[in-house]
Every structure is written in C-alpha cells, then in structure tokens.
Image: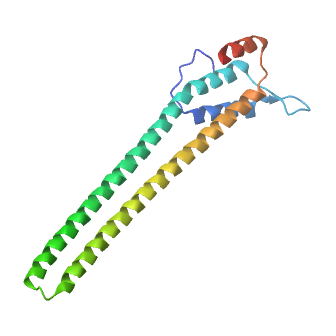
Amino acid sequence: MTTMEVHEPVSVLELVDQLEDVVTAARRLPLSANVVVNEDETLELVDRIRLGLPDELVQARHTLEDRERIIATAEEEAERTLRHAEEEAERLLRESGDRAAALVAEHAVTAQARAHADALVAEAEERASVTRAEADTYARDVMLRLEEHLMRAVTTVRKGIETLPVPPDARHRERRERR
C-alpha cells in the first residue's frame, strides 16, 4: 500500500487485521523473534486505525443511545401495562360496586374484585420489572461485547506499535503528539 492509493472505508477491526497480516507476513530475522516490516505500510495502517477509532466510538455512543431507547420503550410498555391494569382494576371495581349495590348481601364479590384488581396490578408491576431487567441485561451484554472488541483492537494495535522500531524522526513527532 502506498499513501497515494484511495482506500475504501473499513472498520478498525479490519485495519487491525491488515496490520496483523503485515506483521505475520513479514520476513523474519534469522535466529530471533524479530521481523522486518515495511515502515510506510505499517505506519499508514496505524494512522488509518487512529482515524477509524472515532467511528467506533460513535458506534459505542449509538449503542448507549439504543440502550436508553430500549429502556424508555420498556418503561413506556410497563406504564401502558400498568395503566391498563389499573383501568381494568377500576372497571372491575366499578362492576363489583354495582353488583354489591344490587346484592348488598354478597359482600364477597367486592372482596374478590379487589383481590383480582390487586392481582392484576401486581402482575403488571412484575411484568414491568422483568421488562426493565431484560432491557438492562440486553444493553449490558451489547456494551460488554463492544468493550471486548474495542479492547482487542486496542491491544492488537499496541502490540503492533510496540513491535515497531521508532525511527529518530518519529520520536520527535511522538513527543509533539503527546503534548
């Protein structure tokens, strides 16, 4: 690869794979674990990885936003379920109240309606709690997988950088970049 080539957009992980290919395909020095790599090609890949990282971070932000959206959707669903259960409970209470007025002697109907309404509300609250927990679990799993991919990419890049000799003119550039 030369700096004059036009590059199609690729992910950081693909660039890390390319860097790994450069290192594994490099000529080995006799009697050592060292290899000789094309400095320009390797530094170009490192630069492209560096440029690609913000996109991966944007994806991480989108994943966080997705998590928030999932949680918001789950909370809305839980609220709808709870509202429906409360309306159902109110309806049942009204019906049981009408029956109780007509059948004053049958006080058990009202108690049964209240128990049923309480059971509906408890069930709705339980469903809402489960939905929230599932959304949190899903979002956490997605974030953990993303973190794992990013950590592997960073580790691979760091290993690649550590294996490269630092040319004298690059040391000066490195010091400037650290500032």
- Residue 74: give x, y in percent of width and height: 36, 54
Which of the pair 120/115 is nearer the observer?
A: 115
Q: Quadrant of residue 62?
A: top left
- The N terminus is located in which quarter? top right
Determine the residue located farthest toward the left in the rendered image: 102
- In the figure, residue 94 lies in which quadrant? bottom left
Query: Left or right: 173 with respect to 122?
Result: right
Check the image and report above or below for 24 versus 3: below
In the rendered view, tell whether residue 162 sits above or below residue 124. Answer: above
Q: Identify the residue at horizontal 19%, vertical 83% (top origin).
A: 109
**As drawn, which residue projects farthest toward the bottom?**
105
178 relative position to 122: left or right: right
Rendered image coloring scheme: rainbow
Q: Is residue 10 above or below residue 91?
A: above
Using residue 157 as the reference point, say whether residue 7 is left or right of it. left
- Place of residue 86 in the rendered image (x, y in percent of width and height, measured from the top left): 24, 64
Image location of residue 175, percent across then percent down: 71, 15
Quadrant of the image containing the C terminus: top right
Considering only vertical position in the picture, is 63 above or below 96?
Answer: above
State the residue in front, 6 or 95: 95
Q: Position of residue 39 (x, y in %)?
A: 73, 20
Query: Which residue is found at the position 40% from the left and 61% from the top?
Result: 129
Q: Measuring 24% from the left and 75% from the top, which residue is drawn there?
A: 114
Question: Total number of numbered labels?
Answer: 0
Q: Nearer the viewer, residue 170 or 103?
A: 103
Residue in the image at 73% along x and 11% along y: 172
